[in-house]
Amino acid sequence: MQLRGLDQSAQPIGVRPSAAQDGPGALQALYRALTEHDPFRIAVVDMQMPGMDGAALARAINADDTLTETRLVLMTSLGQRGDAKRMEQIGFAGYLTKPTRHHELKAALSLALTERDGAPFTRPHRHAPHGP
């Protein structure tokens, strides 16, 4: 699922959602939005998708200079310790494990949209913190 620019009248959390069936379809939607001069500000990406997984999609998005303004948030049902750091290195601005609560999604979207290069990466997920 990708989310276009925020619109306070659209949804309770202020987004206009759009969905794609797979990674290649998501790329097509991102390019189409660019040509319509209404680019996606954020994309919520599922890790397990047909055609390409979320990490491959993120790499494709980050490799294209025309799409680098789209912030990426990953959702996965198979999260493990260390995944958030690995996903940050791939280019995700947020990481959530399913099931995700409404307030967690809202916080992740807000943080992903406000953080920029050089700002600390925030991992809004429910994994237990790493201990010594």
Image (tube, grey):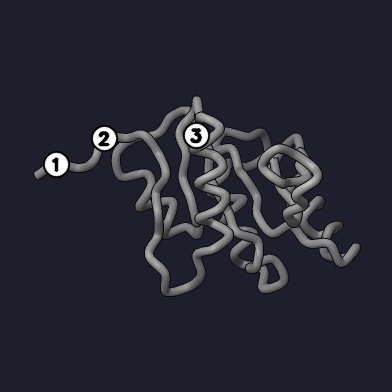
Q: What residue type is labelled 3?
A: Thr
SS class, disc 3: strand
Q: Is mark 1 on a helix, strand or loop?
A: loop
Badge 1 crowding class, 10 Å Cα cut-off, few under 14, some 14 to 19, many 20 or more, is: few
Q: How far apart are marks 3 and 1 (CA)?
A: 22 Å
Distance Cα–Cα, label 2 vs label 3: 16 Å
Return the x and y of residue 83 as percentages of the image width and height: 37, 44
Instruction: Please identify, in this view, whether the residue under mark 2 or under mark 3 is nearer the observer.
Output: 2
Q: Which residue is drawn at 84% across and 58% down?
A: 33
Q: Name the residue under label 2.
A: 128
* Quarter where residue 39 is shown: bottom right
Total labels: the figure holds 3
Q: Nearer the viewer, residue 63 or 116?
A: 116
Taking the spot 81% from the left edge, 51% from the top edge, the residue there is: 29
Of the numbered discs 3 and 1, the one sitting upstream in the chain is 3
**Of the residues under marks 2 and 3, which one precedes in the sequence?**
3
Label 2: element kind: loop
| Residue beneath disc 1 | 131
Labels 1 and 2 touching (C-beta < 8 A): yes
Residue 59 appears in the rendering = no
Q: Nearer the viewer, residue 26 or 33?
A: 33
Real-space Cα distance between discs 1 and 2? 9 Å
| Amino acid at pointer 1 | Gly
